[in-house]
Image (cartoon, coloured by chain):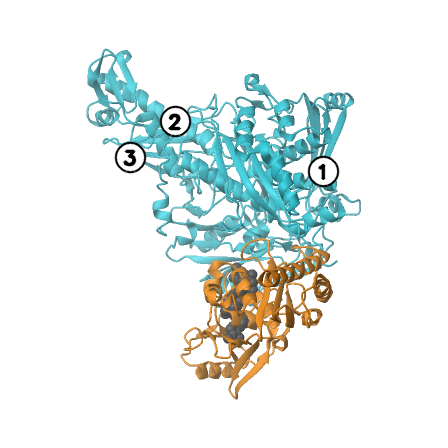
């Protein structure tokens, strides 16, 4: 008997084609909007055109008069049912439908349920709302001014626009570090508001059946079980009477974690009308009202020794949360994982002061393909590191190398208290520098200068915490951040796997089967993966924060091991030896003393239903819940070279090298896809993408002509490399990879442009580095801030 | 995104289309490529009672060079046809330069040059090209045909001088006397983005001497800006650095940009200046190389 070839059966390391693509490329995906139920009605939301105003009156009579209109809901009607407000995942409240005031442009003011979406839209336009406008706050500076209008006058004891003040780290120790510094380097920047912007917007179909009292909701959610818990809380229905189904999802990126007013209204409407109610958000609604990303002002300083060692870091963050504190983040830390900054560097002391404010902007979200502010943290870190290297007059690669946590220093406790456990940072950097041609770059720079062009090289190296939780520090609504997998091996050795995660493009249907193949030797194609239905999937916390592989993926390995343990007993029975004499190789148990005598895993599966030993429970099914001991810490080194046209400020990427160490790669092709996608988003943020507001609070970026997604045309090519340091605590050594590139990528582009502009006395250009900002920096020699609202006129 | 209710007609003859427009009394709108109109309907920026789809009208897809060298672009000639017409590069270099910069490849498969000019978006690329080259719109209504220079056709942002019962059947670009030269440059944040600023230059030259010059600017005013007056600095001599500088100064002065999320007003003005200089310097280099 020759051993199975793991790659051939689609196990670990196989670049297996994605099984889900089979239906997607045929147009056979099944998204919420594809679902049509008998008697289904359609809901449209009327949104506020203004950013801050008292609602004087709402007249819905003309809307009710339109034939085909079944229900018009206003805040007043919601309030009667105690549903005008709902709790957020950050322990604040958020208006479902406005009662007193509107607090941002796009806020939900009323909704109409009608026979078709056209009628519903017409009826929304027929609703007359009288607003009395109030002064508008569009940035934290305005929010903190002494005469600032109070945005959250609905909250008792809220007398200003501060959401929280929070700190972490060792203030006194950091002071001491700064007192000893030879040099202090500073930087100040704004990470602009962006939007995850999945192509499929949010939507739901609520279907309440009075006869069974059961509520079924088909919904675009990355976390169906959490939604079930939240719905149970808000709608006061018991969990067993709620079924949340998350069908195919057209991208999430964090946008589909929160609970949105539209979901709540469709549920209430279905309960009132006893008919299915479909709500499909339009693109503008999605961009102006749902979970955004970033929007933080970051300022900090670094204490340095002449020899290049970092002694300490101070960070200040001022985050703009919009009208409601609705961050969908599960950590105990008010500013998420911001203090994961500098984890790759060996720094003795650090301190972070964080302040959050309310403004008249859209609430919620905050994580756009990133683990709760890790993106801002790593961006700040790598911009700070470059500034420090420049101030020291030290080579930027060398400065990093001198300060990296060394390979033999793990586990390493960071100055902010995280525990990193593995990595080869120096090696990743070396691979990157070699690939980009770092040694020859100065030559190329000179050659370009002779053509009137400026060349720059930018490095971004970082390790980030991926895969919430562990249960000690991470929970949502009190539910600990574990995850789960349930495996049923049928009589023929074919299997059904379900997890508590929810794929939205990550390829779980492909990769989970590969983990099972690795653990059991079943061909991956024999394993069907299902997720997203709370009536069938084991309880889990969903997919975001790169947590699927670290947590649910680990649960898959663990449940397969449980199955293997039972199969071993069956094998011993079939081989008529004691269990201790049975050995395992991929897909087969054999007798240690007689390796030719063996049984396959499929034969064991058959025995579980047809020939089990006396006293053994029949069947071959199990479930595993996995609470990770730690986060996983992938490392990335991204290096960009750019060419700047000083006459226009236009910059082009010449080369981009990515070296990712995400531990063991389950499906290298999918990993590469994740990196390419993330780098594309990183490039978008660096070059073109932001949501901004004018002084009146009008959202600029409310459609795809203003909020730009890059196309294949302008996106640069990415050269990918890998280093593998297995995760020491994950059952198969894997680490998260879904977010590394979005998180670490932006700083590489910005650092490269800033490197090109080194001679101009400029320290920072805020993203997006639109040509006009770069040109302004070149011509004025001053930093260019993205801070003021859009200038309507000069 | 759901538009308001509208009627739809798909006439098979031009007369029929004009008849429908007449009956519409201004509440009927022509649907050509739909790449501007459909988004407007979906956003409910426009709510016409009736769409008159001209896509089934015969004889409007042409892209023809007449014996006298003038170019006729029919109302159903798509951007993509212009992009693929390699033969335009010699006699109409400004058109050839602009075609691949209009919108994105998908939009170019359906959108039309004539529709773009009718739409009169100050950020539309074709109006600038047409004005720089002295092109005219041929319009047909109940009482016959008339010819309107594009420079007089656009009457404001998203406004043109057509009567509600007139169809723009084609746009005619006159043949160059002598050698044609020129170009189009556009600054965009991404493929498919409207211009932060764009410059169209159309020149005719006899040897090294410029005999006619037209220039127009995209995205830097409430309507496409005709900067032909500034271009007069180029006429009657060679493309010297001094003349180029005067034309660029003139174009920058003619621009009336507003600062927005694409860039500041000063920056847009600077880009106009830079692009005029770049287009003209390239032409001058070509002339020198040819000599
Ligand atoms: C994503 C996207 C990006 C774009 N980017 C650009 C860009 O970068 N640059 C650019 O210039 N354009 C851009 N456009 C617009 C595009 O070029 C349109 O094709 C063009 O503006 C309109 O042409 P159309 O044939 O699609 O006209 P339609 O949308 O069918 O009509 C537009 C208007 O013109 C009227 N009209 C059309 N044809 C006639 C006619 N024969 N007679 C009288 N009236 C008529 C219609 O009634 C309507 O009011 C973009 C469009 C999209 C969707």
Do tag 2 and tag 1 residues touch (Cβ < 8 Å)?
Answer: no
Depth check: A738 or A649 in front? A649
Depth check: B290 or A91 in front? B290
Do tag 1 and tag 3 residues touch (Cβ < 8 Å)?
Answer: no
Reading the image, the residue beneath label 2 is A557
Q: The cyan chain is which one?
A: A
- Label 1 vs 3, first from the N-terminus: 1
**Image coords of residue A50 (percent x, y):** 66, 57
Real-space CA distance between mark 1 and mark 3, rounded to the nearest whole angstrom:
54 Å
Residue B4 seen: no
Real-space CA distance between mark 2 and mark 3, rounded to the nearest whole angstrom:
16 Å
Q: Is residue B196 above or below residue A427?
A: below
Depth check: B278 or A718 in front? B278
Residue located farthest toward the front when viewing the structure as drawn: B291
Reading the image, the residue beneath label 3 is A526
**Image coords of residue A302 (percent x, y):** 71, 28
Residue A548 seen: yes
- Label 2 vs 1, first from the N-terminus: 1
Q: 10 Å neighbourhood of mark 2: few (<14), some, or many (≥20)?
A: many
Tell me the subunit letter for badge 2: A
Tell me the number on the disc at residue A188: 1
Q: Find numbered disc 3 in the image and state the secondary structure of the residue it sits on.
A: helix
């Amino acid at each position: 008997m020759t051993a199975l070839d793991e790659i051939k059966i689609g196990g670990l390391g196989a670049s297996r084609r994605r099984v889900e693509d089979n239906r997607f490329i045929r147009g056979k995906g099944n998204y919420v909007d594809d679902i049509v139920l008998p008697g289904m009605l359609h809901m449209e939301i009327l949104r506020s055109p203004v950013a801050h105003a008292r609602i004087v009156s709402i007249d819905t009579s003309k809307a009710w008069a339109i034939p085909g209109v079944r229900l018009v809901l206003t805040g007043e009607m919601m309030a009667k049912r105690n549903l005008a407000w709902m709790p957020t995942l950050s322990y604040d409240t958020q208006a479902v439908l406005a009662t007193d005031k509107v607090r941002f442009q796009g806020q939900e003011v009323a909704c109409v349920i009608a026979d078709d979406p056209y009628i519903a839209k017409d009826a929304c336009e027929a609703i007359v709302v009288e607003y009395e406008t109030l002064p508008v706050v569009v940035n934290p500076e305005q929010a903190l001014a002494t005469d600032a209008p109070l945005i959250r006058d609905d909250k008792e004891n809220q007398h200003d626009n501060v959401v929280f003040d929070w700190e972490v780290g060792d203030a006194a120790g950091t002071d001491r570090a700064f007192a000893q510094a030879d040099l202090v380097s500073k930087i100040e920047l704004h990470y602009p508001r962006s939007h995850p912007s999945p192509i499929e917007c949010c939507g739901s179909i609520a279907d309440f059946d009075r006869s069974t009292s059961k509520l079924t909701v088909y919904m675009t959610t990355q976390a169906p079980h959490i939604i079930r818990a939240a719905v149970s809380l808000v709608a006061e229905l018991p969990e067993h009477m709620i079924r949340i189904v998350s069908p195919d999802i057209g991208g999430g990126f964090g946008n589909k974690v929160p609970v949105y007013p539209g979901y709540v209204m469709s549920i209430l409407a279905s309960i009132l009308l006893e008919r299915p109610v479909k709500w499909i958000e339009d693109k503008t609604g999605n961009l102006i009202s749902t979970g955004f990303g970033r929007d933080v002002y970051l300022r900090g300083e670094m204490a340095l020794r002449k020899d290049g060692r970092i002694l300490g870091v101070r960070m200040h963050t001022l985050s703009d949360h919009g009208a409601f504190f609705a961050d969908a983040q599960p950590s105990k830390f008010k500013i998420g994982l911001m203090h994961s900054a500098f984890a790759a560097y060996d720094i003795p002391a650090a301190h972070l002061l964080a302040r959050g404010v309310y403004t008249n902007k859209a609430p919620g979200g905050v994580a756009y393909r990133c683990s709760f502010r890790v993106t801002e943290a790593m961006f700040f870190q790598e911009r700070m590191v470059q500034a420090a290297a420049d101030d020291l007059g030290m080579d930027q690669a060398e400065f990093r190398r001198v300060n990296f946590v060394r390979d033999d220093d793990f586990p390493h406790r960071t100055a902010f208290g995280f525990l990193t456990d593995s990595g080869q940072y120096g090696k990743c950097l070396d691979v990157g520098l070699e690939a980009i041609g770092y040694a020859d770059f100065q030559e190329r720079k000179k050659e370009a200068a002779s053509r009137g062009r400026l060349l720059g090289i930018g490095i971004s190296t970082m390790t980030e915490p991926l895969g919430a939780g562990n249960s000690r520090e991470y929970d949502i609504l009190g539910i600990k951040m574990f995850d789960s997998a349930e495996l049923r091996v049928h009589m023929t050795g074919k299997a059904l796997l379900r997890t508590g995660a929810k794929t939205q493009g990550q390829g779980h249907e492909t990769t989970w089967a590969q983990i099972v193949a690795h653990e059991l030797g079943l061909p991956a194609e024999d394993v069907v993966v299902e997720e997203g239905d709370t009536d069938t999937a084991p309880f889990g916390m969903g997919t975001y924060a790169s947590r699927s592989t670290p947590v649910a993926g680990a649960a898959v390995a663990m449940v397969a091991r449980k199955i293997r343990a039972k199969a071993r007993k069956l094998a011993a029975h079939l081989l008529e030896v004691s269990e201790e004499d049975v050995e395992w190789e991929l897909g087969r148990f054999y007798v240690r003393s007689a390796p030719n005598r063996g049984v396959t895993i499929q034969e064991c599966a058959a025995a579980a239903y047809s020939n089990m030993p006396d006293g053994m429970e029949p069947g071959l099914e199990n479930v595993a819940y996995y609470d990770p001991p730690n986060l996983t810490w992938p490392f990335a080194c991204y290096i960009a070279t750019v060419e700047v046209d000083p006459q226009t400020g236009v910059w082009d990427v010449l080369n981009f090298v990515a070296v990712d160490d995400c531990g063991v790669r389950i499906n290298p092709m999918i990993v590469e896809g994740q990196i390419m996608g993330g780098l594309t988003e990183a490039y978008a943020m660096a070059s073109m993408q932001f949501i901004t507001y004018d002084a009146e609070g009008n959202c600029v970026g409310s459609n795809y002509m203003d909020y730009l997604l890059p196309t294949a045309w302008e996106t640069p090519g990415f050269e990918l490399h890998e280093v593998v340091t297995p995760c020491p605590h994950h059952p198969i050594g894997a680490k998260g990879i879904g977010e590394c590139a979005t998180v670490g990528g932006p700083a590489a582009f910005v650092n490269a442009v800033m490197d090109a502009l080194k001679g101009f006395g400029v320290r920072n250009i805020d993203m997006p580095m639109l040509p006009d900002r770069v040109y302004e920096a070149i011509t004025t020699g001053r930093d260019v801030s993205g801070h003021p609202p859009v200038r309507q006129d000069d | 995104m759901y538009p308001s209710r509208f009627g739809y007609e798909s006439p098979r003859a031009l007369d029929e289309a004009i008849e429908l427009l007449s009956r519409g009394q201004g509440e009927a709108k022509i649907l050509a490529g739909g790449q501007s109109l459909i988004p407007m309907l979906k956003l409910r920026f426009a709510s016409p009672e009736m769409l008159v789809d001209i896509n089934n009208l015969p004889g409007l897809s042409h892209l023809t060079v007449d014996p006298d060298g003038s170019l006729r672009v029919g109302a159903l000639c798509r951007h993509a046809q212009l992009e693929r017409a390699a033969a335009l590069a010699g006699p109409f270099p400004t058109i050839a330069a602009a075609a691949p910069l209009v919108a994105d490849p998908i939009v170019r498969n359906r959108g039309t040059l004539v529709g773009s000019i009718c739409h009169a978006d100050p950020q539309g690329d074709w109006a600038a090209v047409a004005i720089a080259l002295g092109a005219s719109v041929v319009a047909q209504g109940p009482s016959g045909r008339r010819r309107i220079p594009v420079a007089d056709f656009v009457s404001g942002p998203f406004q043109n001088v057509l009567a509600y019962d007139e169809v723009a059947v084609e746009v005619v670009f006159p043949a160059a006397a002598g050698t044609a030269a020129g170009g189009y440059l556009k600054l965009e944040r991404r493929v498919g983005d409207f211009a932060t600023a764009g410059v169209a230059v159309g020149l005719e030259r006899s040897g090294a001497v410029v005999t006619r010059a037209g220039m127009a600017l995209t995205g830097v005013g409430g309507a496409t800006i005709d900067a032909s007056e500034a271009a007069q600095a180029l006429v009657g001599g060679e493309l010297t650095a001094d003349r180029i500088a005067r034309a660029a100064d003139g174009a920058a002065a003619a621009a009336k940009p507003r600062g927005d999320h694409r860039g500041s007003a000063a920056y847009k003005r600077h880009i106009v200046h830079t692009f005029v200089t770049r287009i003209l310097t390239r032409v001058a280099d070509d002339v020198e190389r040819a000599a």
